[in-house]
Image (cartoon, rainbow, N blue to C red):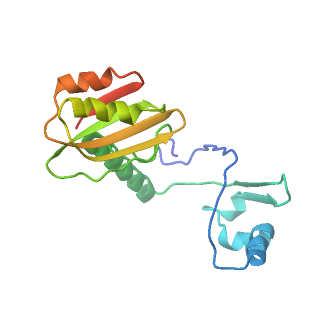
Amino acid sequence: MTDGSGTATRQEVLHGTFTVERDLAAPPGAVYAAYADAAVRRRWFRMPGDPARGHYELDFRVGGHEAASGVFAPTGEAEENCAVMVAEQVRDFLENGNIRNSVNYPEAVLPRIPNTTRLAIANSNVPNMVGQISTCLASSGINIADLLNKSRGEYAYTLIDADGALGQELLAELAGIEGVLSARIL
């Protein structure tokens, strides 16, 4: 981050526990050694920025830790690329209902089917939500051409491409289903 004058400012990011899973074309002993030996690991785990201003420590024992810190001065090109990426993802959400890189919702990307109407529904992650939504559409004579339902924790998100037009009356019915947080026609 910069302070507006182009000078890098400090921003600290702390991460909790996470799991990395990979399939590697190497014997387990060689993979373990690559993780456990800090000197070997440093050859493929590189911190950006000035190495003299960074810090790295590794305790690969059970209950150990790995810590890395450094000065991450973004380049103008990187900042511009991030801004373009964010703008593209926001536009895709507004136009197609697709979600990428959300904190609360899962990634949900459904390619559009031509000549259909897109419906985006955010709802509580509880049983029978998809059933209630599809029953509501069916009782209005609406066929589902494609459907995607994804969940993360207590939230779920449903994208539907429906044959034909969808009206505000149907949208109000869907919004009235207990657990539906929002519904919109795109």
Pick the front one: 65 or 177: 177
Q: Mark yes or no: residue 4 visible.
A: no
Q: Is residue 149 left or right of residue 43?
A: left
Pick the front one: 143 or 158: 143
Looking at the picture, does residue 39 appear above or below residue 9? below
Q: How many marks?
A: 0
Looking at the picture, does residue 44 appear above or below residue 54? below
In the rendered image, the quadrant that contains the C terminus is top left
Q: Is residue 59 left or right of residue 135?
A: right
Q: Is residue 175 left or right of residue 106?
A: left
- The spot of residue 55 in percent (x, y) is 74, 57
- The spot of residue 135 in percent (x, y) is 29, 32
Looking at the picture, does residue 176 appear above or below residue 12? above
- The spot of residue 170 in percent (x, y) is 21, 26
**In which quadrant of the rendered view does residue 76 lie?**
bottom left
Q: Residue at x 67, y 50 (%)?
A: 18
